[in-house]
Image (cartoon, rainbow, N blue to C red):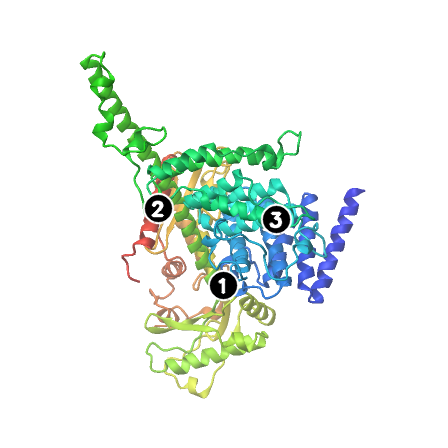
Amino acid sequence: MVRLAASALVSSYRKAVELLRKRQMHQLVVQALHELGNLLWLEGDASGAREAWSDAVDTVFQFPYAIKNWCKCIESSLNPPQDPARVEILLLSVVLLAKHARLTKPKDMMAHLNATLFASNILEAILTTALPNPPRRDEFVPNKHRLREIFFGLRETRMILPPSSVYGGVDGCNFLSALSFFQNTLVVMNYQPARALPICSLYTYVATDVCRNVALSIKGRLLMVQSLIRCRFFTEAWLALYAISQNHDQPRGLVEAEALDKAIVEAQEMSNATPFLQHEEPWSEANTQALKKLVDFALTPAAAGVEEGATPSGTAAWNLWVFKKLKAEFLVTVRHPEVLGGQVTKRSPESRSHQNTPVQVKKGRSEEREPKEEDMPNQNLEDTFNTTLTTIIEGKISDIVEDIRDFKDQMKTSRNQLAYLLYQEAEKQRSDAACKIMVKNCWQYVESDENYALLREHREIMINWAAQEARIDEKDIRHFHFDHRRGKSISPFTMVNVGNFYTKQKLMEWYAQNFDKKGITEWTSEKLSHLTNGNNKAEVNGMIEVEPCIAAFDRMQTEPLKAMMAVITKLAPNLKWRHSWKHLTLQNPETEEYIAWLALDHLQGIAKVYFDRRLFTARQFEDEFHAVLGAQMTKKAVGAKGKGKSKGGEGVLTDPGGFLKAVGLGTDGKGSYYKVSTLSMKTKMPFTFEIRCINQEEFATKYTGHLDRIAKRILQPDLLL
């Protein structure tokens, strides 16, 4: 009965969404989709909830697939809000991003990081553009700025506090949970932790001044301290811990007015405090005293949010534990050979070999290590020498071990950031290709450039006509970018960058609805008929075809993996495996061992296929791979026989100076289908394939080397294209 009622409720929400869309009530559409996703999630339909929340984000920014293409969405659709209503819907989108990543993709860390960066840009667009908030994210530290309002005229009690419904509201706990999720993602992945500062500042404001909850307020300030330590803002982190231990800036009751005398006392205490100074050495006298005071900082259960007479639990217990953890993290981090005040600072000899409190007077290594005679009057000279030697050796060994551990941590962090950079670069290239279309088979072309202006005008007029027929706005058509050349000569293919995915989709839908697979008959005129090289081929040239470039981009990377799957299925039919389009790998689902991996090097044009030597031999796999890939890539290529010969294609490949010569292939004698198929495959697949069998433990090493090689080429380019 309950399930039937839930199905009826979900159906009602879907109908409401459609009705609101027709009436152009976008804000209510977003709120309805939010609640629809909540209902689907409670029903156990994670994919339906993901689709509803993703659709809601698309509606907020009026951008298709906004979560997937968030970089382009930020560039084109994210503008500083001009009114409180827009701020409300942007804050709702932040919660939607958190739910989409956290609930529907719990194991996808890359999706978590992308959602976090998207949400960070949204929050910064709100906070950094609204006075009197600072314009930079690194200025949202507690001792420089205390957030007092999100946006002028915004009523948080209307959007943040109420529970989610069609008429607004996200629930204060859900909103704070989303902010905490984004902060935790940045800290755990150690990627641009400064982005967490505005997030933590907003968390503290909502918890302290809107929700007025002591436990949540302390939690927000502890999250801020954690982010400050990761950003190496040690002075600000020390002051924030000091303010927490002194019970400063506690939430006030609803009927309690702000006490000016209390605020003055708190300000004086903060001014009189001597914090840790990050521009000085960690073992300086002033910083040593600050670290000693830090050890004495304490957080009482009442200040952490524990009710009188109750046992610490929930957020309050978390606050007590994290406060101690952050003190320890602060002490460990300031003695770590990392970036301090923008410069790499080496640790002193004392801080390396002695883990106790740093000494006040800096001594030389020989003076500190060598025991004095009056300190050991009864010891034998040989025992003294052995003790001293052992101390020195142990100290040096511990120093070396610490240096190796520190270097390993730095390399791990750099590798994570580098892997994300490469992934983002690939996604950017793919998203750029998603905005382009290819117009094929423009038969009126010449090898010289004497009629280039005429041919360019002819093609662009025809493409613009097609765009007008597809009801694309004139303003968008004027921004089309055309590329008609192949090297120095004009090509029979024209690449058109239409600017955005929506325009491309609209043009492709018009083409599919009005024309068959043969395409559009190319226009002609008297000027074009006089061209010397204007030889039309029936049913091949002169029939303009339009196809999206994203298909070619995907095919270039996925066809080799499809060939690998076909080879494995043929050679080892009983072998179980699963594939990954993202990583181009084949793995055993039970043991998680790699069966094969495709390593593509786009710049050098090399594709290496690695496979487990225990399963196949190199010659066997290579022969089958080339045969399968050749068959796949020439199925629809010009010159493939298929089931029967087409009359329309006769003479196209064998005519000297004809079609293949114009596109750079040429011919290899009459009826040489094998040669034409090989050339067609090279045209579509610009890689030289290398087949290599390796041991299972070598996959990780090969991946690391492949990543480093590509990264070096990006960071230190030595090849001019």
Q: Secondary structure at mark 2?
A: loop
Looking at the picture, does residue 473 appear above or below residue 230? below
Would you name the residue on which mark 2 appears? 279
Q: Is residue 321 left or right of residue 655?
A: right
* Residue placed furthest toward the left: 381
Residue under the image location 34 percent in, 67 percent down: 664
Residue under the image location 63 percent in, 57 percent down: 56
Q: Earlier in the sequence, mark 2 or mark 1?
A: 1
Q: Amino acid at mark 3?
A: Ala
Residue 183 can be seen in this image: yes
Mark 3, other Cα within 10 Å: few <14 / some 14–19 / many ≥20: few
Q: Earlier in the sequence, mark 1 or mark 3?
A: 1
Q: Which quadrant is home to the C terminus?
A: bottom left
Would you name the residue on which mark 1 appears? 75
Which of the numbered marks, if any, corresponds to residue 656?
Answer: none
Residue 585 can be seen in this image: no
